[in-house]
Image (cartoon, grey):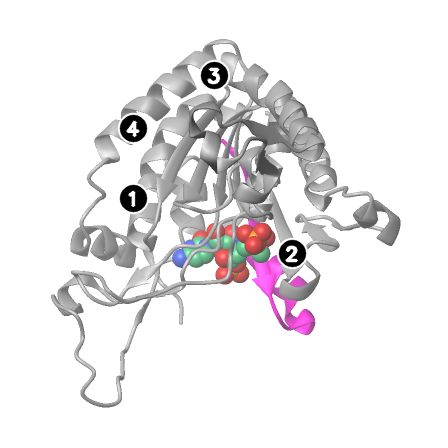
Amino acid sequence: MSVGPDEWETYFHNNEPPGNLEDVKSSVDRFVKEHGASNRKIALVTSGGTTVPLESNTVRFVDNFSAGNRGSSSTEYFLLNGYAVIFMHREKSLLPYLRHFHFQNFLDWFKLTSSVEQQASLELSVSSELHDRLVKQLSVYEKVKKENRLLHISFTTVTEYLFLLKAIAKIFDRLGAIGIFYLAAAVSDFYLPAPEMPEHKIQSTGALSITMKQVPKLLSPLVREWAPKAFTVSFKLETNKDLLISKAKQAIERYQHQVVIANQLDTRKRMVVLVTSSDEKIIDMSDAELTQGQEIEQKIVEDIVKQHNLFIASS
Ligand code: PMT
């Protein structure tokens, strides 16, 4: 089943834009003006999964597995390569720099060094591991912050994501080739149109059957209308390895953008394939690299930066 341009109009017509849309446009506009003026390359990185509400007063929604690891770590590597980044992420998903403190219970990093009875003089000690980790991340983060190179924008539902992406893309278009889209978010493929959504919590009075519509593919208007001069990288996720490369090639042919990064759910942290109209390149990680804590996103972003530079030079 394919979805054409009319469906886009219908989608935006039938759904309410997010309340912060105008604020987001203003902050993106300022960010793009500031970095565009110095010809700095700017990446829009999308990250995390979108939700699909089942009720207007939402109690239940459909979600997906994405934690935002790919997007948040790639953002750090774009920043390391001198880019400014608009980090468009699912609310409460992993964030650049902060993600390095995510895997452990926050309270376990600290210890009280005086007893509770002496409350007036309670003191905290920080583990040396946390201290070293903080110094490492803060030294990069503070520089990025001082240079105002990272802008956070959050979304939750697929509708918020689509309205925000469209608005940002139209502003991004002014940048021409120095703008890059890196679409790592896991965007819902099916949704319940607002006019068909029950207003209140669905009652549990028996089996539930819901028919959802296909969400229009945003890559099509993005590449053709909203920001045709930018460098666009999309991701293709499959669980069946026999489908992966053919689907990635299909996407390149259909949308005519620059790169599809093909990844399989269970191996996504150790192998991806960068598919372009003329090439398929495997990027993988050895056991030793993974044990040392190296990340595949570093290699992916380095390769994408090279391709982006060639694209800018030829534009
Ligand atoms: O966040 P992590 O846990 O680290 O996981 C990272 C990831 C696996 C989510 C990431 O690497 C990834 O593959 N992201 C894309 C997942 C996805 O949506 O794949 P897809 O095959 O369903 O869609 C392919 C492309 O179509 C995507 O770039 C998407 O932006 C685009 N799309 C999807 C839906 C839609 N309505 N319109 C679109 O254009």
Which residue is most to the top? 38
In whole angstroms, how far apart are the C-alphas of marks 1 and 4?
11 Å
In whole angstroms, how far apart are the C-alphas of marks 1 and 3?
25 Å
Lower sequence index among marks 2 and 4: 4
**Circle 1 Cα neighbour tier, 10 Å, few/some/many (<14 / 14–19 / ≥20):** some
Give the amino acid at mark 1: Phe
The dot on residue 148 is 3
Of the 4 image quadrants, the one containing the N terminus is bottom left
Span highlighted in magenta in the image: 228-253
Give the amino acid at mark 4: Lys
Instruction: Tell me where residue 2 appears, x and y as whole percent.
Output: 40, 66
Instruction: Say which residue appears at 24% left-offset and 56% top-offset.
Output: 11
Left or right? Give the position of 135 relative to 175.
Answer: right
Looking at this view, is 205 or 4 the one in front?
205
Instruction: Tell me where residue 264 appears, x and y as whole percent.
Output: 65, 63
Lower sequence index among marks 1 and 4: 4
102 w.r.t. 84: above or below = below
For the residue with label 2, is its CB less than 8 Å from the closest atom of ligand 1?
Answer: no
Left or right? Give the position of 207 relative to 33.
Answer: left
Q: Are marks 2 and 4 in contact (CB under 8 Å)?
A: no
Instruction: Say which residue appears at 65% left-offset and 58% top-offset.
Output: 263
Q: Are marks 3 and 2 in contact (CB under 8 Å)?
A: no
Q: Secondary structure at mark 1?
A: helix
Left or right? Give the position of 15 relative to 52.
Answer: left
Lower sequence index among marks 3 and 2: 3
Label 2 sits on residue: 262
Q: Secondary structure at mark 2?
A: strand
**Circle 2 Cα neighbour tier, 10 Å, few/some/many (<14 / 14–19 / ≥20):** many
259 w.r.t. 66: above or below = above
Q: Secondary structure at mark 3?
A: loop
The dot on residue 163 is 1
Is 52 contained in the magenta span?
no
